[in-house]
């Protein structure tokens, strides 16, 4: 047992750090570090920069154009990116649809879709949840009926994150109503420019447009866009959930936020002193700091386990999201009444108008509100406890 | 970065667990506790034969040169079986202190005797009113020629009543809370003026109150440097905390397993109560606490031998903080899910609960260690 990174891993960290110093554009870094509103442009631009370096898809094996890094190296990469103020790369293409295409897709699908994902040219969205199908995802009702060389898709997907920018969407659709719910679902790749698709914004509680409803009305999807076999989509989706959950631990992002929170705690004033000097506040920060350390070690334990992430990854999702939410909660509390004012324009870098308090307060309450999503999406934390009960504890 | 055990460590863990499963049964444990002796010659000698009493001592002193991770493996196994033997007191605390700070002569005299199982020791450092502050010492050692005369009293001397020899912290200069001026002395338990009052603890261990009245020791009884005993004492306690963290992880696992088994057997409303989601989620939370605790116990074990004080202290206090909170959550949940049976003496869960509860109180509870990391945070970032 050895908790130190190897000299090779340390050298790798330095290499990543140097690259970030030389290549992360200042305007992107500023938006990320001040927690301003992010744009499609900054995410795409950053993806293209990473792609040119050969680092566009940190989790991919070499044969598909990834760098072939070990999982510990991937973690180091993500951590350094987050600490440097790089935007989080989008999971939907890189970490969600790509692994499914790699594992279950045919050669044409791999050739057609993987290059656009890693280069940042094609923006993917996820079409899983429906208005009536959240935690009980297998009850989904969007249908795909075979008609010659096409599937005709009808129905509605919801909570589609950043779907307003989407070029393609991967969907779970019902292809068979006569079998058990899980056995009649297929995994379909859909070009969002196809006629009959309508994307409508859902405004979140922080006033921001991040998620969408996606409506499908007689959308013609070529049968070659079916991944794997018809009616086997549930198996592929389950395969994918493991990937999503490990990423949701988000250790690198949270370490960066913890660093930011400590800065905030030093800057924000409490009756003539920094709020960090208030023992009630500081104790909660110290508690969270310890919990984040435990999370990081647990992630490393899961990652370096030869058997790979199993259902234990549900722990990471639960703890990772709880810790993330708490970080933003403390950041809001640190700014006190300065967090009251809702000034959406101040989330743009060129804002010059009136403000309440400093830049720490601008995103504080909105971020806190927004982050309530963490314990709800990706399989709610209650569903994760069900998974632990069933698959780990055998109940 | 790897969390794998070596082949030797794996073998050690397997054989120790097998031994405890066979020899350290619920009934055997009860007999040992009821004997009031605080240790069992058969068990202790078997541990000596397995090499466990010498595991972390240098090879020059009949040891095996092990480290904090080895201690973790032993203590975790002890935690699973709720072993009440004086391992923490003798091997980890006193043995560790002599190993890290003792003179060659002291190591020669003490470590092989511990290794063979013939010598039991205890650390007498905490005092009433000081709570967990290691520097708060009123016991005085006054120079008398080349000798010292000790006066004072000590509390929470774990397995003090079983020890042949004590390590006593005493003030040789400075005021009651001064970090300088603390000296560590070897004091024979049967020396004139030493009174050891032995008590049972709620969890089957033993503790002692020790008073020292004009106890005379020679200068050769000093461990390390006079007046500079605190860093060594603090490191020994940190190693003790790391060991307790590992023990707690073993006990938390045992509690989770006992609770899983019980709820799958116990039927109400016509089904095993494990079928109820409200109970399942509580057990999932027990599992999460145990896993988080395991991560932190590994961190503590990995840090315990370090002389980088700041990093070691941070890791140890973070670990005891989260594990202390975990002992409470897992302990209370385990009893609750056993229902009425959980509050009876016949249930394993009740005994695990008592040990978990007392582990939190030992060497600083969760609040104390939260204060430690919180103050360190202020130092670091203010």
Image (cartoon, coloured by chain):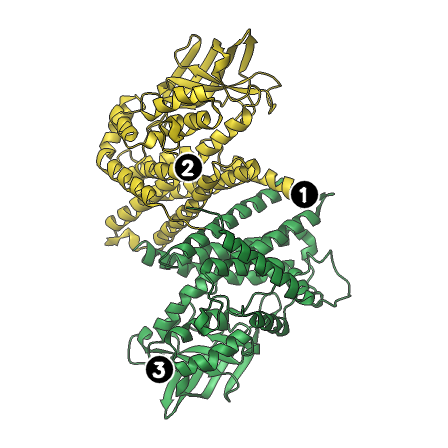
Chain colours: A green, B yellow
The residue at which mark 3 appears reads as A175
Badge 3: chain ID: A
Task: Please state if A166 lies on the left or on the right of A108 as rendered.
Answer: right
The residue at which mark 1 appears reads as B382
The residue at which mark 2 appears reads as B67
Badge 1: chain ID: B
Kind of element beneath mark 1: loop
Crowding at dot 1, Cα within 10 Å, few <14 / some 14-19 / many 20+, comes out as: some
* Distance in Å between CA atoms under marks 1 and 2: 35 Å
Kind of element beneath mark 3: loop
Residue B66 place in picture, x, y as percent = 39, 36
Residue at left offset 55%, top offset 61%? A371
- Mark 1 or 2, nearer chain start: 2
Q: How many marks?
A: 3
* Badge 3 and badge 2 in a common chain: no
Task: Please state if B78 lies on the left or on the right of A112 as rendered.
Answer: left
* Distance in Å between CA atoms under marks 3 and 2: 59 Å
Q: Label for residue A233?
A: none
Closer to us: mark 3 or mark 1? Answer: 1
Q: Quadrant of residue A163?
A: bottom right
């Amino acid at each position: 047992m050895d908790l130190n990174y190897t000299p090779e891993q340390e050298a790798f960290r330095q290499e990543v750090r140097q690259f970030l110093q030389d290549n992360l554009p200042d305007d992107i870094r500023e938006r990320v570090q001040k927690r301003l509103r992010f744009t499609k442009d900054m995410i795409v631009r950053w993806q293209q920069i990473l792609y040119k370096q050969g680092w566009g898809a940190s989790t991919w094996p070499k044969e598909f154009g990834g760098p072939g890094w070990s999982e510990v190296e991937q973690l180091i990469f993500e951590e350094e990116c987050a600490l440097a103020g790089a935007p989080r790369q989008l999971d939907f293409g890189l970490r969600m649809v790509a692994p499914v295409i790699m594992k279950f897709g045919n050669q044409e699908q791999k050739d057609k879709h993987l290059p656009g994902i890693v280069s940042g040219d094609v923006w993917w969205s996820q079409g899983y949840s429906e208005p009536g199908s959240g935690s009980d995802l297998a009850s989904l009702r969007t249908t795909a009926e075979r008609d010659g060389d096409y599937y005709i898709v009808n129905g509605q997907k919801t909570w589609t994150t950043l779907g307003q920018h989407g070029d393609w969407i991967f969907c779970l659709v019902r292809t068979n109503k006569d079998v058990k719910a899980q056995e009649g679902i297929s995994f379909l790749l859909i070009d969002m420019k196809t006629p009959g698709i309508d994307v409508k914004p859902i405004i979140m509680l922080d006033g921001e447009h991040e998620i969408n409803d996606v409506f499908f009305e007689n959308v013609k999807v070529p049968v070659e866009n079916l991944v794997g076999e018809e009616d086997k989509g549930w198996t592929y989706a389950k395969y994918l959930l493991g990937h999503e959950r490990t990423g949701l631990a988000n250790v690198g992002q949270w370490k960066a936020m913890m660093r930011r929170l400590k800065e905030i705690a030093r800057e924000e004033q409490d009756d003539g002193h920094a709020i960090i000097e208030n023992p009630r506040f500081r104790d909660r920060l110290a508690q969270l700091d310890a919990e984040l350390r435990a999370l990081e070690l647990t992630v490393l334990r899961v990652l370096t386990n030869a058997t790979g992430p199993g259902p234990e990854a549900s722990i990471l999702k639960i703890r990772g999201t709880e810790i993330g939410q708490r970080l933003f909660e403390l950041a809001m509390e640190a700014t006190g009444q300065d967090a009251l004012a809702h000034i959406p324009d101040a989330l743009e870098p060129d804002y010059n108008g009136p403000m309440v308090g400093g830049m720490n307060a601008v995103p504080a309450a909105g971020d806190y509100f927004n982050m309530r999503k963490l314990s709800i999406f990706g399989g709610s934390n209650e569903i994760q406890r069900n998974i632990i009960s069933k698959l780990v504890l055998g109940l | 970065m790897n969390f794998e055990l070596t082949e030797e460590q794996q073998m050690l863990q397997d054989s120790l667990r097998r031994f405890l499963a066979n020899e350290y049964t619920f009934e055997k444990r009860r007999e040992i506790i009821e004997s009031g002796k605080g240790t069992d010659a058969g068990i202790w000698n078997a541990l000596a034969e397995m090499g466990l009493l010498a595991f972390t001592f240098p090879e020059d002193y009949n040891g095996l040169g092990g480290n904090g991770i080895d201690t973790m493996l032993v203590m975790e196994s002890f935690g699973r079986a709720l072993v009440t033997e004086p391992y923490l007191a003798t091997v980890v605390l006193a043995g560790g202190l002599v190993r890290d700070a003792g003179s060659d002569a002291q190591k020669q005299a003490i470590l092989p005797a511990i290794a063979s199982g013939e010598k039991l020791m205890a650390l007498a450092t905490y005092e009433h009113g000081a709570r967990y502050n290691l520097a708060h010492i009123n016991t005085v050692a006054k120079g008398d020629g080349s000798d010292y005369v000790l006066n004072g009293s000590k509390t929470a001397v774990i397995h003090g009543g079983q020890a042949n020899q004590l390590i006593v912290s005493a003030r040789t200069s400075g005021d009651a809370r001064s970090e300088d001026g603390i000296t560590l002395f070897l004091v024979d338990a049967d020396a004139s003026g030493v009174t050891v009052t032995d008590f049972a603890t709620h969890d089957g261990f033993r503790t002692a109150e020790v008073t020292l009245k004009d106890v005379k020791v020679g200068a050769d009884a000093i461990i390390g440097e006079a007046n500079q005993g605190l860093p060594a004492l603090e490191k020994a306690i940190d190693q003790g905390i790391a060991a307790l963290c590992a023990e707690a992880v073993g006990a938390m696992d045992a509690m989770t397993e006992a609770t899983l088994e019980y709820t799958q057997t116990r039927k109400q409303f016509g089904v095993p109560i494990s079928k109820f989601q409200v109970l399942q989620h509580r057990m999932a939370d027990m599992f999460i606490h145990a896993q988080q605790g395991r991560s932190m116990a590994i961190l503590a074990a990995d840090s315990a031998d370090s002389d980088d004080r700041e990093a070691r202290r941070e890791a140890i206090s973070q670990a005891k903080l989260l594990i202390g909170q975990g002992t409470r959550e897992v302990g209370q949940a385990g009893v609750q899910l056993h229902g009425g049976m959980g509050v009876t003496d016949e249930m394993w869960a009740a005994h695990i609960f008592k040990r978990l509860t007392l582990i939190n109180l030992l060497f600083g509870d969760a609040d104390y260690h939260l204060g430690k990391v919180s103050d360190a945070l202020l130092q670091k970032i203010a």
